[in-house]
Image (tube, rainbow, N blue to C red):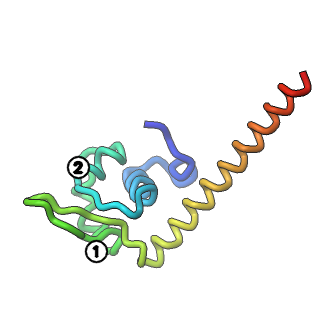
């Protein structure tokens, strides 16, 4: 799994990996298995984090499909709002840098 700019800036920890994954898909609901797999961590690791994330209102339960509970990022949480802003700014800055690099490459090819 490639390291995103968000993870690169904040550190490659299970909690940051989960936040990165949830912020990326902030409008979607996820099962515990989905969160763990997409964040690249073990289910047991996520289970250890789950109570704290629920208590801190980072995520909240949404729908239930049979025995499977789905969760969603709590975008009303003030701290999560700030993380989303930071995530979006990091992505914007990285995109702008990449666009500048690509423009330079195009100019060099045109001049040749």
Q: Position of residue 41 (x, y in %)?
A: 31, 45
Q: Residue at x 33, y 74 (%)?
A: 57
Q: Quadrant of residue 40?
A: top left
Vertical placement of residue 72 versus 57, above or below: above
Q: Residue at x 72, y 44 (%)?
A: 99
Q: Position of residue 74 (x, y in %)?
A: 37, 72
Real-space CA distance between mark 2 and mark 1, rounded to the nearest whole angstrom: 20 Å
Tell me the tag on residue 33.
2
Return the residue at label 1.
Answer: 55
Check whether the beta carbons of the residues at disc 2 and disc 1 lie within 8 A of each other: no
Q: How many marks?
A: 2
Q: Position of residue 98 (x, y in %)?
A: 70, 42
Q: Farthest residue in the front direction? A: 110
Vertical placement of residue 85 versus 24, above or below: below
Q: Is residue 76 left or right of residue 91?
A: left
Q: Position of residue 54 (x, y in %)?
A: 27, 71
Q: Residue at x 29, y 44 (%)?
A: 37
Q: Is residue 108 left or right of residue 80?
A: right
């Amino acid at each position: 799994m490639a390291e995103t700019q968000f993870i690169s800036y904040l550190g490659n920890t299970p909690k940051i990996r989960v936040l990165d994954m949830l912020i990326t898909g902030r409008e979607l609901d996820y099962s515990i298995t989905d969160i763990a797999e997409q964040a690249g961590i073990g289910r047991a690791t996520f289970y250890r984090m789950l109570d704290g994330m629920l208590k801190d209102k980072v995520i909240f339960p949404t729908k239930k499909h049979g025995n499977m509970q789905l969760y969603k990022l709590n975008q009303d949480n003030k701290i999560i709002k700030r993380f989303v802003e930071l995530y979006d700014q990091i992505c914007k800055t990285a995109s702008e840098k990449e666009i500048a690099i690509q423009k330079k490459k195009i100019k060099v090819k045109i001049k040749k």
